[in-house]
Image (cartoon, helix red, strand yellow):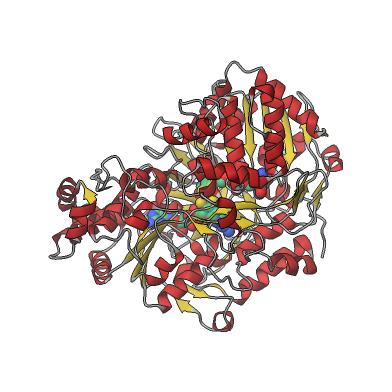
Amino acid sequence: MSAKPPADDPVQDAPEVGEPLRAAAGLPAVAHSLRVAGRQMGARRTALTLLRVNQPRGFDCPGCAWPEPEKPHRAEFCENGAKAVAEEATLRRVTPAFFAEHGLAELSERSGYWLGQQGRLTEPMYLAEGAEHYRPIGWDAAFELIADELAALDSPDEAVFYTSGRTSNEAAFLYQLFAREFGTNNLPDCSNLCHESSGSALTETLGVGKGSVLLEDLYRADLIVVAGQNPGTNHPRMLTALERAKAEGARIITVNPLPEAGLERFRNPQTARGLVGGGTALTDLFLQVRLGGDQALFRLLNKLIIERDGAVDEGFVREHTHGFDGFAEAARAADWDQTLEATGLTRAEIERALEMVLAADSVVVCWAMGLTQHKHAVPTIKEVVNFLLLRGNIGRPGAGVCPVRGHSNVQGDRTMGIVERPEAAFLDALAAEFGFEPPRHHGFDVVNAIRALRDGQAKVFFAMGGNFVAASPDTEVTERAMRRARLTVHVSTKLNRSHCVTGARALILPTLGRTERDVGSGGEQFVTVEDSMGVVHASRGRLRPASEALLSEPAIVCRLARRVLGERSATPWAEFEADYAAVRARIARVIPGFTDFEERVSRPGGFTLPHAPRDERRFPTATGKANFTAEPVTFPRLPAGRLLLQTLRSHDQYNTTVYGLDDRYRGITGGRRVVLVHPEDAAEAGLTDGDYADLVSEWTDGTERVAPGFRVVHYPTARGCAAAYYPETNVLVPLDATADTSNTPASKSVVIRLTPGAACQ
Ligand SMILES: Nc1nc2c(c(=O)[nH]1)N[C@H]1C(S)=C(S)[C@@H](COP(=O)(O)OP(=O)(O)OC[C@H]3O[C@@H](n4cnc5c(=O)[nH]c(N)nc54)[C@H](O)[C@@H]3O)O[C@H]1N2
Ligand SMILES: Nc1nc2c(c(=O)[nH]1)N[C@H]1C(S)=C(S)[C@@H](COP(=O)(O)OP(=O)(O)OC[C@H]3O[C@@H](n4cnc5c(=O)[nH]c(N)nc54)[C@H](O)[C@@H]3O)O[C@H]1N2
Ligand SMILES: [Mo]
């Protein structure tokens, strides 16, 4: 085992391409995860650490937000969870000596992969104005520097406080409280780039912006539709749930432009049959939809349901919904030809889907980024809601909406008030509890924060985790915007691109990860998180922290707040830092559903937050009912010779953290600069498999953006659609290309042309 990072930048992008696999997980996955983990932390630590993941007294996997079953399997983690844990529990360290050796100019030339491979950050570091190297700085001096910059602003709204989705409930609650006591709602978060479209659509139609199903509902469903999601890579434990659902009789329809191995067939690494046998076929019907064709697909299905005698649940529609007539009129106008064009599907495929829908008493629809990152993402998800409402598939067992969240606590962060457009009721509760007047006007989301930085309206950027410049769209614009800031601050576990593209001055504040023991002035603490299904539970790190100098996220916020707010604040920040139970006591008083928080979260498995549509078929919307909506159907139309590019994840990455250069299920090894295209589309561009192409994105204002040197890979994707990995392709996504209403970047819908190019050196 070597805990030393590779000396050279290993990104010699030279992809090799084999056949995509037809099944996911199984023995190769176990071997792969142990190999990756062993490289980072050695065999003993690997075994000890991985056995604690997602256990009742262990820590919550920092990977995805998929819930834990009530009785977790002894190894309730997956290959990619193991990689996420290994990234954090690595024995490699980034010390002040590292920064003395590597200057900013050099670091900003390094790949994200190389930066991440250097290991855990160990001490607070400061980059002075004009300096070439980060230098160590004490915690107090760091907080003072931030306080001085914040005090120099003309308005609190010139500061931006970003959050990624790994932050615990306690840290998130404190962080938003600090930002609001300081005076701003500028609390953009990774949700703005992720499931914001789901939140917008569900809040308007059902009254709650979260999923309405629990794990048991999947097991009880007759039909599960998985649209725009690749769980084999991004939520591998979901495959175990789908396998069980199938065993209980469910059928599965997959809607995706790509055949994803994990959904085709699953070899469960936790069972003997899965390890060595053929595994379980998961998908019964694969609808290979064109990018952005989902709204049209669901609209047509809805028309067909309405036209079928007895297919609509009339009692439910009458009693619980609003707007049926207007919707039904729009749905009846749905057109077969237009749908076939939008989806690229055949009539027979859609008819088969309809029969499966009508045969099912209970239906769950699961989705992720394939639905949320389009210009018409919100109307698309609203159409999914229409689809479920028609047959009463909300608020009863085995049925409902299941937006599958990304980051492990992204849903909890929102529940805790990390949101740039807070509701008045939440602000009222905060004001009453803490005795201050929170700002009422809305703040910046991610895209508007970039605009504000670009235009000089925001001057201090503070990030609680994440990798803002690499995760955001329009890389060049975003990087230029960030460089205009007076101060950029990152609370981070690992080095990343955002530490290299900085404001005039920059700070890196190193923090504890999920896997680590949090022992502060008040003794050992635990934190809590909320999964994708609204289950809140405790998370206790067990490993020794990567460095003695680390502070926990709550401690960082509390100390910063004391320094910045001083006498202005009546909040007991020191007490909160010492005792997270005191924070939870306040959360219980401010946020609905958290009564007896401390007691209920101490139970193994935690507790489930209330969800009115799920629990009582009550819909807290503007009309007091579940709303049918009749949005016009749209879908992307391309000029001749253009393709629609989706930017997605490979199997060896966690968002901007690249674990390795393989995408095993898709048959790609040793490189990331690949573009997956249908052979006939490649031929039309005068290219064939193995050629290199530049990706040129065309935006409506006539501007073009180029990502050079992608190896063309013939791939069985839907016609007219291409796929390439993010974050490399974020340079192609225009800042203004966002979803209506939610303002989420349309990263699954980039109009490009391929021009012959050469491999990048
Ligand atoms: N290992 C690992 N786990 C992760 C992450 C990670 O990077 N690595 N990221 C986490 C995060 S933050 C998130 S949000 C989730 C992301 O989870 P996913 O949403 O599964 O991630 P993507 O790779 O973006 O995959 C999008 C999927 O949608 C399909 N798709 C794209 N466009 C369309 C469309 O128009 N219609 C339909 N029907 N399908 C479409 C793509 O082909 C692909 O299968 O995963 C989380 N878990
Ligand atoms: N083109 C394109 N762009 C996308 C997407 C896409 O599909 N296509 N997906 C979008 C989505 S869904 C998301 S969620 C965003 C992700 O955006 P972010 O959440 O901002 O990005 P990550 O890559 O997850 O952040 C990784 C960094 O988080 C830090 N970190 C890890 N764990 C911890 C911790 O416990 N505490 C702290 N303080 N820091 C920690 C590490 O320093 C690491 O380098 O990207 C979005 N961008
Ligand atoms: Mo996400």
Residue 517, relative to residue 460: is it above or below?
Answer: below
Q: Is residue 463 above or below residue 65?
A: above
Identify the residue at horizontal 63%, vertical 39% (top origin).
Answer: 464
Which residue is rendered at x = 18% and y = 61% of the image? 312
| Side of 731 relative to 331 (left or right) | right
Residue 283 image position (x, y, % from top left): 40, 71
Q: How many marks?
A: 0
Determine if residue 655 is in view: yes
Residue 424: give x, y in percent of width and height: 42, 32
Query: Of 20 and 332, which appears nearest the observer?
Result: 332
- Which residue is painted at 60% across and 54% down in the image? 654
**Residue 534 percent coordinates (x, y):** 48, 55
- Quarter of the view holding residue 400: bottom left
Residue 481 lies, in percent from the top left, at: 59, 28
Nearest the viewer among 230 and 545 is 545
Q: Between 581 and 166, which is closer to the camera in this rendering?
A: 581
Q: Is residue 469 visible?
A: no
Query: Residue 162: which quarter of the image?
Result: top right
Compare residues 405 and 575 and report the one nearer the observer.
575
Whether residue 23 sits left or right of residue 305 in the image: it is right
* Residue shown at the point (26%, 56%) measured from the top left: 389
Where does the N terminus fall, quadrant-wise?
bottom right
Using residue 755 as the reference point, say whether residue 640 is left or right of it: left
